Amino acid sequence: MELCFHHGGAETWQSDIVLVPILDGSDIVSTNTELDNACPWLRTAPGYQDVSPHKHRLHMVYGGQEGLCRVLFLGLGKEADFSLDIFREGIGKAVAFANTYAFSHMLCSVSLLASLPFGKHRLLEELVYAAHLANDVYAPLKKADPNTHTLQTLTIAHPTPDPLLEKAAHKGAHAASATLFARHLAAMPANHLSPVHFAHQAVSMAKRAHIPCSVLDEQNMRQEGMEALLAVGQGSKNPPRLIVLDYASPNAQDQDPLLLIGKGICFDAGGISLKPPAKMHEMKSDMSGAACVIACMEQVAKEGLDCHVVGIVACAENLPDGNAVRPGDVVRAMNGDTVEIINTDAEGRLVLCDAINYAKTHFHPKAIVDIATLTGACAVALGDAIAGLFTKHALLRDRLLAAGELCGQYLWPMPIWEGYRQKLNSDVADICHTGPRQGGASIAALFLAHFADKTPFAHLDIAGVDWAEHKTALCPKGPTGFGARTLLEFVRGGSL
Ligand code: BES
Ligand code: MN
Ligand code: ZN
């Protein structure tokens, strides 16, 4: 969908439909002179009497002889209950509704947003974001469905050019691009997205976004001493890859970077500690964290944000095989620590620990943030709408919470508690990679924090939120892309 900006009087508006969001009790139709100029027939149209401001009520009103002949009202409920979540969802429903009519063009006027809470810039950003998400029908492995229609253009009307409004709209579009790219990657089946393919995707993104990118193969990993990462990949014919994207604006070349690290398990069968078959297919998206990092990096570069950010994703396939790592095996991680592997299904922390080690050795990061579909325990603790945020660092916590809040991707602080450290003691190695089931999400975070050591560190566990069981207005069933926009907002938020 193309974003257009229209300037000039409302009598020059052109579109299949005009979208009019209304709050309960608002008299936008009688007070908005633009709307009156664009659709002088509106107030006397018979259908207008049936318009309802109830939350997410959609109602189309027809009239006029030529020009604009359809107005789509979107009820937003009472002002006191209004939220950006309600707004985004409403916009998503309005776009889906428009698509059932096979319209191509939708117009929304900034003046209609100006009277709502949160202000026109914020709402415009969210409108563009939500419209893009709702309009997406990506299904590359299906035959095209002739009955699927999508909006071709979204026109934002404003009497005069306004760079700040355009910036807000573009921010929304970039956030949507990040989310959709992450979703599309995570939806790819493992036979279409091996670690090598994932690296190709990252390299071609890096080319179009002009980000220096390097890919480590097994031989490079062996030279670096990344036995933990290699151990996870050794049960698959598809070899592991570590992908490094190093973005710096001209001003920030010499700054210590922020490190974003993603878990990129292209398929997680559990390895020798094989998972039960139910829902195992969902483990094709066990690379959602990596997808979020790649998708975020693209938009950071596209926006030319003034910062130094390095994205590292550790990709491998966790399969059982004659060559697979066994429970009880001991490997040496890149920092020299020996790690006892108890349950081969706890593979995420193994690939992440070597990604963290690599980041520390090669980049002197000012902070590390990782994102991973790490533990079922986190999903049990927080459900399918909130992700776990694990950090001891107050500024990282506050900044990440704010970033998530901004985009409706809610995070909840969870502990990294040193009191549990002895639960990771091993009889035979320096550290064991799992502890008891109880507190599993925190113990996984503690394992990662051990490798981050003194570097400020935060971990996002998205195991509960990366996959939607049911379609919603902004997301089809399947991968959600949760985290891509949060990371982008976090980076947009400025240096730490
Ligand atoms: N990828 C899974 C976690 C997961 C589960 C993500 C469900 C999304 C939905 C992870 O690799 C895993 O298997 N974790 C184990 C850890 C355990 C063996 C310590 C788990 O959560 O059971
Ligand atoms: Mn696993
Ligand atoms: Zn996994």
Image (cartoon, rainbow, N blue to C red):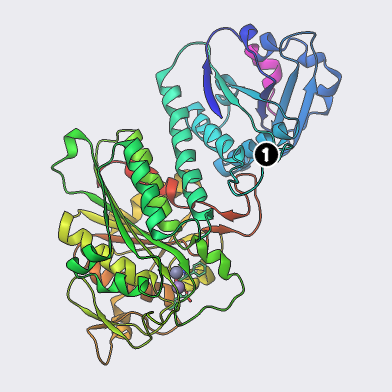
Residue at horizontal 17 percent and vertical 34 percent from the top? 251
Q: Main secondary structure of the magenta part?
A: helix
Left or right: where 327 falls relative to 363: right
Magenta stretch bounds:
25-34
| Residue 283 screen position, x and y as percent | 52, 66
Is 239 situated above or below 58? below
Residue at horizontal 78 percent and vertical 15 percent from the top? 43
| Residue 352 screen position, x and y as percent | 32, 66
| Residue 50 screen position, x and y as percent | 83, 28
Q: Observer-nearest residue: 101 or 129?
A: 101
Left or right: where 127 falls relative to 404: right
User: Does the segment drawn in magenta span residue 229?
Assistant: no
Residue at horizontal 29 percent and vertical 64 percent from the top? 392
The residue tagged 1 is 93
Is 225 situated above or below 179? below
| Residue 347 screen position, x and y as percent | 39, 73
Q: Amino acid at mark 1?
A: Lys
Is 286 situated above or below 437? above
Quarter holding residue 282: bottom right
Tell me if I can see residue 82 in this picture: no
Q: Observer-nearest residue: 278 or 412?
A: 278
Tell me if I can see residue 423 in this picture: yes
